[in-house]
Image (cartoon, coloured by chain):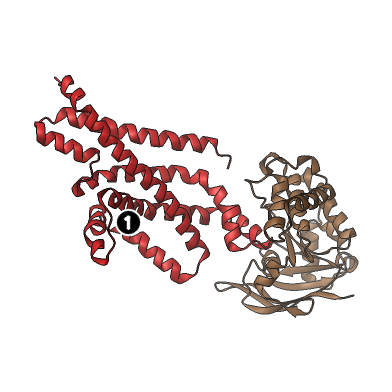
Amino acid sequence: MLDIDFMIEILPRVLKASLVTLEISFLSLFFSVFLGLIFSIIALSSGKLINILIRCFVEFTRGVPQLVQISIIYFALPYIGIYFDEFWTGVVALSFIGAGYTIEIFRNAVLNVDRGQHEAGKILGLTKYQTLIYILYPQIIKRSLPPITNELINVVKASALLSVISVNELTKIMNDVIFEYFVVIEVLLEATIMYLLIISVLVYISRYFEKRLVV
Amino acid sequence: MTNILSINNLNVFYESFHAVQNISLSLNEREIVVICGPSGSGKSTLIRAIAGLEKADSGDIFINNKLMSEKEVFKNNIFGMVFQQFNLFPHLTIIENITLPLIKVKKINKSESIKIAEDVLNKVKIIDQKDKYPSKLSGGQQQRCAIARSLAMNPKIMLFDEPTSALDPEMINEVLDVMSDLASTGMTMIIVTHEMGFAKKIANKIIFMDNGEIVESNTPENFFTNPNKERTKTFLNQVLQH
């Protein structure tokens, strides 16, 4: 049987930790999408060199294990004078991880817009940059939402890795409670439910916007 | 008559396929040239290369006897282009489709650009549709809007790349009527089309292309009644059979 009293006793700690997970996730999601927009626009309107640099960033964030990326930001960056505390290390790491995917999603979506749209912009005299901002990006937001949401779910899940650098998020607190009380099932259950809840809300918000958008 | 466009020895390759072969062509102000020919003959590639949408591998394009960079050609709206697939911007209303380039490229303020847009929409007779999105309009209306959008930019030469090929038969005439109106205002035009009756009526010169080359360039009268080349006769027999 589940120890309901114990579950209620630890609930405030779990909720507080969920809030930290939510905060880190929200900030990382925001920066992932923001960086994805900025860097995909730069990639699409720039020359070869800039594109190679962005390509390197994308390959790095997608190719290096997430735990290693977190460690690089937390342990290695201070050597060159860049220091983030645990919380912001988490936000920066997850934002980069997310951006690696969002850049590619936005870039590919723009390249998949019918060639006629690019050409109509060009012949009307719009610059490459104006065509991107006023013609192409407004058309890709709706169709980018489902793949973006999938990647952002991965970002939320990756936040569990931040327990290794002692960010007091959900997974860290879950482990703490397990080792303090030697009770496993109740804590696991609460943590699982909290993760599912956070991700459901995220998916719900994304679907809401998807339905609202015209194009 | 002043020369507005001359093309010297234009060549376009797709990999090893020679799509446009050594084409030279010259156009005076107010002149209307119709380009026809079987599909795959290079007529669309030619008009797209003139517009700057297809990279020419060699050859020069002079506008008012001046060689212009691709960037200048686009920035100064030398060409207006009407596409087979309309290419309206689906996220903007009809009037926004026209005002956006006016505001962003010509730097005209919003109220002035709305006036210009309403004026061209009146000319193509779809002013009553101005606040709708393109997807709510028929193909013929969409194409007329596309013509209006090009006209609003005040181009020197209008290019039409099979403007009626994607339309249902009953909508073809409303687009051709708008093009005839435009011709009567003295607009210089190059038209790629399969509408031979329309070509006969509107053109000052008809060019027949096959395999990337100009086979025959003639006046409409001679082109239809007394063509120079055997290849032209075969083509006309095929398209005018019914």
Where's residue A112, x and y in %?
52, 54
Q: For residue A180, which quarter of the picture? A: top left
Residue at position x 69%, y 50% in the image:
B97
Q: Nearer the viewer, residue B16 or B172?
A: B172
Where's residue B6, x and y in %?
77, 76
Q: Nearer the viewer, residue A39 or A176?
A: A176
Q: Nearer the viewer, residue B157 or A23?
A: A23
- When the figure is inspected, residue A11 is found, relative to residue B130, above or below; the finding is above
| Neighbourhood count class around disc 1 (C-alpha, 10 Å): few under 14, some 14–19, many 20 upward | some
Q: For residue B203, which quarter of the picture? A: bottom right
Left/right of residue A52 with respect to residue B135 in the rendered view: left
Chain A shade in the render? red
Quarter holding the N terminus of chain B?
bottom right
- When the figure is inspected, residue B211 is found, relative to residue A174, above or below; the finding is below
Label 1 element class: helix
Left/right of residue A153 with respect to residue B103 in the rendered view: left
Residue assigned mark 1 = A62
Residue at position x 23%, y 53% in the image:
A67
Where's residue A13, x and y in %?
22, 32
Q: Decide if residue B42 is in sight here.
A: no
Q: Nearer the viewer, residue B123 or A208?
A: A208
Residue at position x 70%, y 76% in the image:
B68
Q: Decide if residue A20 is in sight here.
A: yes
Three-letter code, disc 1: Arg
Left/right of residue B68 with respect to residue A147 in the rendered view: right
Where's residue B118, x and y in %?
80, 48
Q: For residue B2, which quarter of the picture? A: bottom right
Residue at position x 23%, y 65% in the image:
A79
Chain B shade in the render? brown
